[in-house]
Every structure is written in structure tokens, then in C-alpha cells.
Amino acid sequence: LGAMAASSPGFGRSRAQYVKWIAARFAIDAKDTRLIPDLSAAADVIIRAESKALQVPREAIIEDHGKTYARVLRAEGAADKREIHVGLRNNTNAVVLAGLRDGDEVVLP
């Protein structure tokens, strides 16, 4: 896996700010008849993983003055802003380490 990310070639200037390329070489352990020459591929590089972690969508996270919150729905339909502690994050989800329980419903903006 390459050590440095490069701006994406062939994309507009604004997209080049968040789309990056990293050179990678990998080997395929098993043969699959669907693989033919000149196909493109994508891969997710898993650096660290947690099993059975409570997750919320990244859009549900509110960061304010160095603290992290989520709006949690109450039984009567109103929502409370509750402080949470977040662990691992990816592009779409974040692991909640404390502040939420399984079954809590978070409000998305």
C-alpha cells in the first residue's frame, strides 16, 4: 500500500480536495471465473474493526465546543441533545462508546 495519497487525476478542482488516490498492489488467493483481464476494482482497507459496536450515522453527530452530542428521541416525540463519546469513524458511521443505549433513536438533521 502506498505511503502518500495524491489528488485525483481527471476530476474537477473541488472534488480533488476530498477524492484521493493511493497506489496499492494486491494478490487474489482464489480463482473466480468472473474475473477477466482489464476489469477495474475497488477495495476497502480495514485498519481497525470492532465487532458488535453501537453505531450511528455520521450525520447524527453534533460537535460543539469540543464535545460531541446526538439528538435522542424521547417516547413523547420530542428530542433531547445528549452528550455522547465517539470512537472509530468512517465515511458513513461512527461507533458510540458511551451516552447511547441499543434501541435509542437518534434524530438526523
Image (cartoon, rainbow, N blue to C red):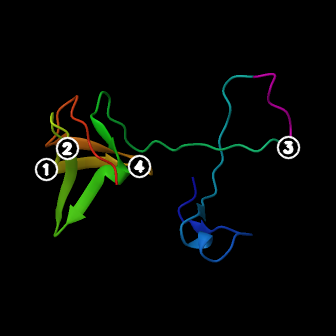
> What residue is shown with label 2?
72
In the foreground, 47 or 85? 85
Q: Amino acid at mark 2?
A: Val
Q: Which mark is residue 47?
A: none
- Mark 3 and mark 4 lie on one chain; the one further toward the N terminus is 3
Relative to residue 36, is residue 13 drawn left or right? left
Looking at the image, do the residues carrying marks 2 and 1 touch, with CB atoms under 8 Å apart?
yes
The residue tagged 1 is 82
Per the rendered image, the range of residues in magenta is: 32-37
Residue under pointer 3: 38
* Between marks 3 and 4 in the image, the one whose residue lies nearer the viewer: 4
Q: Residue furthest bottom?
A: 13
Residue at x 85% of width, y 43% of height: 38
Q: Are marks 4 and 1 in contact (CB under 8 Å)?
A: no
Say which amino acid is labelled 4: Asn
Foreground mark, 3 or 1, reads 1
Residue 60, image x, y percentages:
31, 50
**Marker count (numbered):** 4
**Residue for badge 4:** 90
User: Which residue occupies the foreground of this view, 3 or 101?
Assistant: 101
Q: Is residue 11 above or below residue 31?
A: below
Q: CA distance from mark 2 to mark 4?
A: 21 Å
Disc 2 and disc 1: Cα gap in Å?
7 Å
First of labels 2, 4 by sequence position? 2
- Dot 1: what SS? strand
Earlier-in-chain disc, 3 versus 2: 3
Q: What secondary structure is found at the residue carrying circle 2?
A: strand
Where 11 sits versus 23, above or below?
A: below
Q: Is the residue marked by circle 4 packed among few (<14), some (14-19), or many (20+) residues within 10 Å?
A: few
